[in-house]
Amino acid sequence: MDGQLNVRRVLLDVDLSMRGPTLTAVAAAIQSSPGVAACSITVTEIDTETIGTDVTIEGENMDYESIVEAIEKTGAVVHSLDHLATGDRLIESVLRRR
């Protein structure tokens, strides 16, 4: 991502193997990334081989590539970037009516 963006929140779809890493290992890796102030990991799905999670990360001037690299170094896999918030303040999502 562009280093000029003030990345403040990301929501990632991340899979972990049943053999590891642990949620705490992934959280510790994320917390060590530049600009990260907080991280929340929610288990969304469990099957025989993987644990699906939603990972919400907030901070100031976070480095997206560093976050992904830190997660993947633990052995977890980032499937997608599902939400991105940048700028001087956070805007909460508003659902559109159709």
Image (spheres, rainbow, N blue to C red):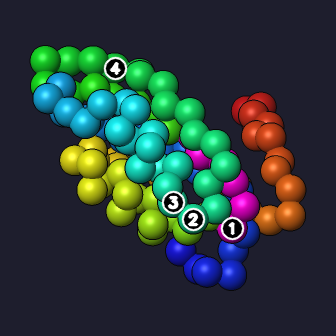
User: Can you tell which mark lies on residue 33?
Assistant: 3
> Can residue 7 be seen?
no
| Residue carrying label 2 | 34
Q: Secondary structure at mark 1?
A: loop
Q: Which residue occupies the extreme right position in the image? A: 89
Q: Earlier in the sequence, mark 2 or mark 1?
A: 2
- Is 57 left, or right, of 88 in this rendering? left
Q: CA distance from mark 2 to mark 1?
A: 8 Å
Percent of width and height locating residue 41: 49, 31
Residue type at tag 2 = Pro
Q: Which range is magenta?
A: 56-61
Residue type at tag 1 = Asn
Residue 70 occupies which quadrant of the picture?
Answer: bottom left
Residue at image coords 82%, 50%: 90
Percent of width and height locating residue 53: 40, 31
Q: Earlier in the sequence, mark 4 or mark 3?
A: 3
Report if residue 7 lies within the magenta region.
no
Residue type at tag 4 = Glu
| Residue carrying label 1 | 61
Residue 72 occupies which quadrant of the picture?
Answer: bottom left
